[in-house]
Amino acid sequence: MSTVLLREVPVDSVVHRLWAGTKMIAAFLISLLLMFLPMWPVLGVIVAFLVVIWVLARLPLGALPRLPWWFWGLVLLGGLINAPTGMKAVLVYTQVLVFGFVLVGASFLIAYTTPMGEVAPALAKLGAPLRKLRLPVDEWAVVVALTLRGLPLLLDEIRVLRAARKLRPKDNLLHRAADNNPLIDILTACMAVSTRRAGELGEAITARGGTGMLTAHPSSPTRRDAIALGVVVAVCAGAIALNAVL
């Protein structure tokens, strides 16, 4: 996988300067459109739009995650399973794959162009109307922000643990037979490391004023955010019109 997975790519562009909430709303609108109209014309317009956004964000091709060979093998296997049913089933299967890739690509664009420190304030501002219902909006925003911040660290820990396990000597068959399941060992070690990191993170947050400081960062949309959302709405409307024509 790419080493920049779920981490901001330090490149200055107009996409990076957008408010985090604007990007989330845009991703939600795209997801809503594809949920109700997962047709090829709509998918084509959205894929082209995401490619344009990627270029405007000036993101390197190295930021794309490198999927393992077995993933593509499973994708091919799914196509072969649907093939006996007919070409229509294969096309529907391909549509589902493209739909998933579009959603993942939009999520990666948000992660690569948004500092993690801006996620919690944006979520808290977007969920402000829910406070009237006495819902813990700030707590939800903090949980999401800390999860996004901690996931890359956990992935790094898994890579280190896998590399360390491969370096362990295996002298004889008796040692191999007594060895535990590699997955169980790695998961146990990850749980221990995550617990320790969670304790350290909690102490650091408490020392800096508590979780309220994570959502208190001033952030609000500007004129460029309104223009960006207008462009997204126009693209979605154009995709709907193109699908109606075709």
Image (cartoon, rainbow, N blue to C red):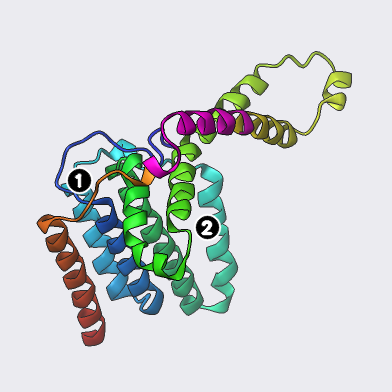
Q: Looking at this view, is 31 or 37 the one in front?
A: 31
Residue at the disc numbered 1: 57
Q: Looking at this view, is 42 or 32 the one in front?
A: 32
Residue at the disc numbered 2: 76
Q: Residue 225: x and y, percent?
A: 16, 58
Q: Quadrant of the C terminus?
A: bottom left
Task: Residue at 32%, 36% (x, y): give it.
Answer: 62
On the question of residue 51 being in view, the answer is yes
Q: CA distance from mark 2 to mark 1?
A: 32 Å
On the question of residue 156 being in view, the answer is no
Task: Residue at 60%, 67% (x, y): give it.
Answer: 81
Toward which corner of the image does residue 11 lie, by quadrant? top left
In the picture, the disc for residue 19 is none
Task: Residue at 41%, 36% (x, y): give it.
Answer: 2
As drawn, 115 above or below 236: above
Please, what secondary structure does the residue beneath circle 1 have?
A: loop
Would residue 102 appear left or right of 233 to someone viewing this image? right
Please, what secondary structure does the residue beneath circle 2 have?
A: helix
What amino acid does circle 2 point to?
Leu
Would residue 246 appear left or right of 140 to someone viewing this image? left
The label nearer to you, 2 versus 1, is: 1
Dot 2 alpha-carbon crowd within 10 angstroms: few under 14, some 14 to 19, many 20 or more: few
| Residues rendered magenta in the picture | 195-213
What amino acid does circle 1 point to?
Ala
